[in-house]
Amino acid sequence: MKKKLFPLIVFSLSLALLPAQELAFYVSQKGSDVANGKSPSKAFATLERAKQAVRSAKESRQRMSSITVFIKGGNYQLDQPLVFTPEDSGTATMPITYQAMPGETVQITGGKRLTGWTKGANGIWQTFIPEVKAGQWRFHQIWVNGENRPRARTPNTGFYPVKGFPEGIPDRYDRKSRRFEFAP
């Protein structure tokens, strides 16, 4: 029995003395989520798939000194939020990093591209969004060519003053500022 345990102990100790490996995954817009993601030529297509691979690597309990996800340059448009939870976190002894490939620029956006724009009266650009009209989608920002643009509103700044009320003045109306006071 002792003779059989000795090689097992020596083998276990030799594994413990092996240096921890650095693990890398790659993401590219030209990649595929069925690839293994372990080289630029076998990159994943999405950040979500890379996140799943990082979780699996952590759960495998292999000796790793770090995990790095290299993202090929480009604009990655997400259909839903990319959510990181404690299961996705690294540690002081095994950091997890998501970074652009050296020398490349990565842009991650969570918007929806709007099409069908037409030039209306007075040179105002407009489009019709059925989901907004149906109350199924709300948006807060509009970006045009990489710049945030203000949404249309009237008046363009401030508020319209209230001149009067058909049923009399409500209790919460401040006559000096001509605005409603909302109690906390």
Image: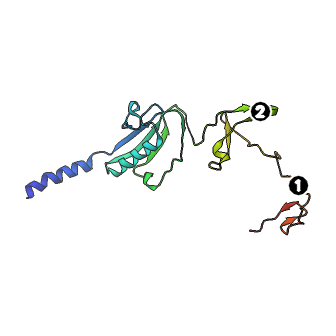
For the point 54% across and 47% down, the residue is 81
Of residue 66 and residue 135, the one placed in the foreground of this image is 135
Which class describes the residues within 10 Å of circle 2: few (<14), some (14-19), or many (20+)?
few
Nearest to viewer (mark 1 / mark 2): 2
Provide residue 152's location: percent of width, then percent of height.
Answer: 76, 43
Residue type, label 2: Gly
Measured as percent of width and height from the top left, residue 126 is found at 73, 36
Compare residues 78 and 28 and report the one nearer the observer.
78
Q: How many marks?
A: 2
- 106 lies above or below 57: above
Query: Cα distance, mark 1 to mark 2?
Result: 29 Å
Provide the secondary structure element on which disc 1 rests. loop
Residue at the (49%, 40%) spot, across then down: 99
Asked which colour scheme the image uses, the reply is: rainbow
**Which element carries disc 2, helix, strand or loop?**
loop
Rendered view: 44 above or below 177: above
> Of callouts 1 and 2, which one flags the residue occurring earlier in the amino acid sequence?
2
> What residue sits 64% from the left and 37% below the top?
114
- What label does residue 79 carry, if any? none
Q: Position of residue 157 (x, y in %)?
A: 82, 47
Which residue lies under the disc numbered 1? Answer: 161
- Would residue 118 be found to the left or right of residue 110 on screen? right
Quarter of the image for the C terminus: give it: bottom right
176 to 4, vertically: above or below? below
Residue that mark 2 sits on: 120
Callout 1, which amino acid? Answer: Pro
Badge 1 vs badge 2, beta-carbon distance below 8 Å? no
- Location of the N terminus (image quadrant): bottom left
Binning the other alpha carbons within 10 Å of mark 1 as few (below 14), some (14 to 19) or many (20 upward) gives few
